[in-house]
Amino acid sequence: MNIFSASYKPFFSALILLSIYQHVFSQQKINFDYNWRFTSIEFTRDNVQKKAGKNWNDQFSTEKVSVIDSSLSAQLPLDNTLEPVKNHEWSDVTLPHVAFPEPLIVNQPREGIAYYKKDFNIPDSLNGKIITLEFEGAMQIAWVWINGSFIKRHLGGYLPFVIDLTHIIKYGRKNTIVVRLDNRSNLQVPPGKPVNHLDFLYYSGLYRDVWLTIQNPLHITNANQIDRAAGGGIFVTYPSVSENKAVVDIKTNVINEFHKGIEFVLKQELYDMEGKLAAITTNENLSIEKGNDKQYHQQLMVTYPALWSPDSPNLYKLYSKVIIGKKVIDEKITKIGIRSIHIDVRHGLLINNKPVRLEGTNRHQSYPWIGNALSDNANYRDAIMIKNAGMNCVRLAHYPQDPSFYDACDSLGILLIDCVPGWQFFNQSATFINNNFSDIRQMIRRDRNHPSILLWETSLNETYPAASFRCKQVEVAKSEWPSGNNFYTSGDSYFTKACYDVPYDDWADNIEARNNTTYPDNPYLIREYGDYEFGGDLSTSRQLRGNGEDGLLQQAWNLQWEHNRNRQMYPRCIGDLNWAFFDGVSGNLSGIKSWGIADIMRIPKFAYYFFQSQKKNAAPMCYIANYWDGKDTSGKVIVYSNCDEIKLLLNGKDIAHQYSDQGPDTPYKTALDKGGHPFDDGNARGLSSPPFTFSNTNYVPGELKAVAYRDGREVTSYVVHTPGKAAKICLEQATQGIPLQANSSDVIFVYAKIVDSAGNLVVNDSSMVHFYINGPAKLISPNLTKAEAGIATVLLQGATKPGLIKLTAESNGLRECIIEVKNLW
């Protein structure tokens, strides 16, 4: 294992690591997440939240202000900064870290000042190297000091910033970094909206990774540090792509921080994921004068490329090497995916000249208890779950998310809509506007090489400033991608024409109309559906798992009804994205926002399986959306499957055999009629896999089995049993195939399922469950938890050393369960 990777063993000291580095590597990023110390000051205030509304317009609380100064101190003396916490105790923390953890049910979002400090040592032998620190994200205004001297203020919590330590650290001696963070909203810093008016939470802390980078003075730059339009770092585009040949266009920015001019060679080597060399190019006899940087343009010709697409996410590794003599003195590795994107009214979305219809979702980067301080593995597990649901696109609402999620989507084949920070707020001040433009630039520079990026959402979500401002946002974005090749912007339309390549749908409280009439010559995207239109904050789509079978079926029906209509507007409508994948929380309403097709603990609802069934050509699946506990009196059994026909058996007896629903599309009536006419054998003609509605199915306790057929052949089945009396607890780790990692920031959910003697989930059980833990880990959540629909959940966090963890769950009158969790490097 590379000890400089994100998972290097933290008991190696920085001194040992850096000493080894100088003999082995030309350039390396070292994880800087360990051995931080933390304290804080929390503020209290009255929390005035909105009242839950049931009307269409109740969702909008757009604020437009014109405020010039929000008292943003550009520089603060360290002594004055630390004075309020001079008598505080400091605790040891590992990043990612949330400064003000929130409870499961958020009534008043926590705000305050967080302080982080860390001692570190850079060996004398590295004097002469270029030493930088990169913060992936710090919420939300940051001030940084090194050895008592103020170095930098950074505005905004969602994009990276870099500090050059080269000339300010003491080599061979202790250095101390101090970071002060203010997570309160600021009118000059997008999103800008006060958190108690916000439909999500800002959270707090150094909630993403920090990296220490060591390079030689002649090196490839960091695109977010050098601040150059369409420049800096590595920038890869694809001017020509076919199945026979692809052109890979590479721009590399190299800087010379030696004290003299330097001659060098720049080499690009492209390898496929099996390690085979696919293409190579070399520019020799290059030179840069001292103190200057230059951008170099090179091309690779790849024959018979393995193209990237959602169904075949083929990746390559690009090695960009700076060479002096025969020595590689700097090297950057960039994962890329060769693909072309074309979007128009006639064809919809084409990837590599093949049609792709978007069936996707929206995601907030948040967990209960730890907020947005997700580990890389936790982000990857979310992506796996989304992919397994049959989704091929995610809108990153409403801000750029952790880099690990983009990496996961590159690998898994999930298209992304990258969103600039913003939500129902606009400040007409020059400072706010310039910060928004900076966010657009920095977002594109950070994410431009990810093949998963489909659209760049430059609009401030649901804010609707003047068309001229929206066009300026697009202009800023396009200045970062001069060729325009494979580059498309998107944004809110709402009956005002601006300059987006792919506008979103126009509609206003008409559940039947998800069109775009403002841009008649443009393709468009339905970027959110399935929630507010069905009753506002009281939407019948918002269903906790504990609401039972009827509630979960109602949510699934709403999504089916609308998704069916949306798909019939293809290809001009390139797809639709439901709101949302996971339940969440917000600052403007108390409680859990139960809009997800999976709950906040990542447990699927019925609607999850509806979407999974829409993957027609995937492996065969079927799911009975029924608990078979006798509480449903409709006589209907709903089966989701991507197969041709379903046979239903009750206690081994064949009771029905039919094809999928083929009835007509019917009006929903109104969004407030408490559900339309659910599962009427229709409203499925636009679906790739209509559900199977079995009517007049009389309840008899026992086993209900669905057998699925393709081309007349049995291919899969699903069984549900009438649950008996609760008898025991079964524990299950929600790893999505990625085990808990021993780095003290990785977390996994563990589910305590209350089951009967035969192992069937007792869905109506809401017992209190006690959890006990032994070993190198801790529970982030309370250890006494109430089961919801038969499942009690805890959040388990690994320690900084490997080992065996024993987790015990017990409840009165039930047999306890003990599982062993391996805490791995």
Image (cartoon, rainbow, N blue to C red):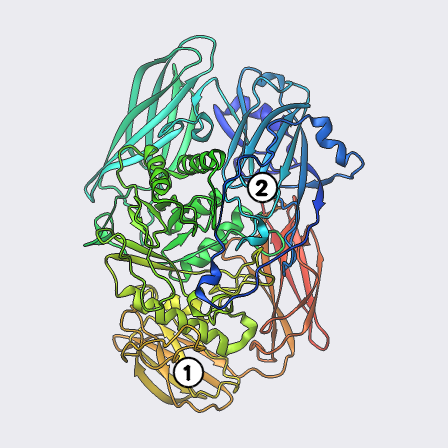
Place of residue 558 in the rendered image (x, y in percent of width and height, measured from the top left) = 40, 71
Residue tagged 1: 637
Secondary structure beneath label 1: strand
Is residue 531 shown to the viewer in this render? no
Inspect this view and state whether residue 466 appears: yes
Percent position of residue 111, x then y: 65, 47
| Front in this rendered view, residue 17 or 748 | 748
Packing grade of label 1 (10 A; few <14, some 14-19, many >=20) is many
Q: Tell whether 517 sits left or right of 374.
A: left
Residue indicated by mark 2? 139
Name the one closer to the observer, 806 or 415: 415
Q: In x, y percent, where is residue 192?
A: 53, 44
| CA distance for labels 1 and 2 | 47 Å
Up-down: is 735 above or below 233? below
307 on left or right of 537: left
Residue 487: name its quadrant: top left
Total number of numbered labels?
2
Near mark 2 (Cα within 10 A), the count class, few <14, some 14-19 or many ≥20, is many
Say left or right for 419 vs 772: left
The disc labelled 1 sits on which kind of residue? Val
Residue at position x 31%, y 30% in the image: 250
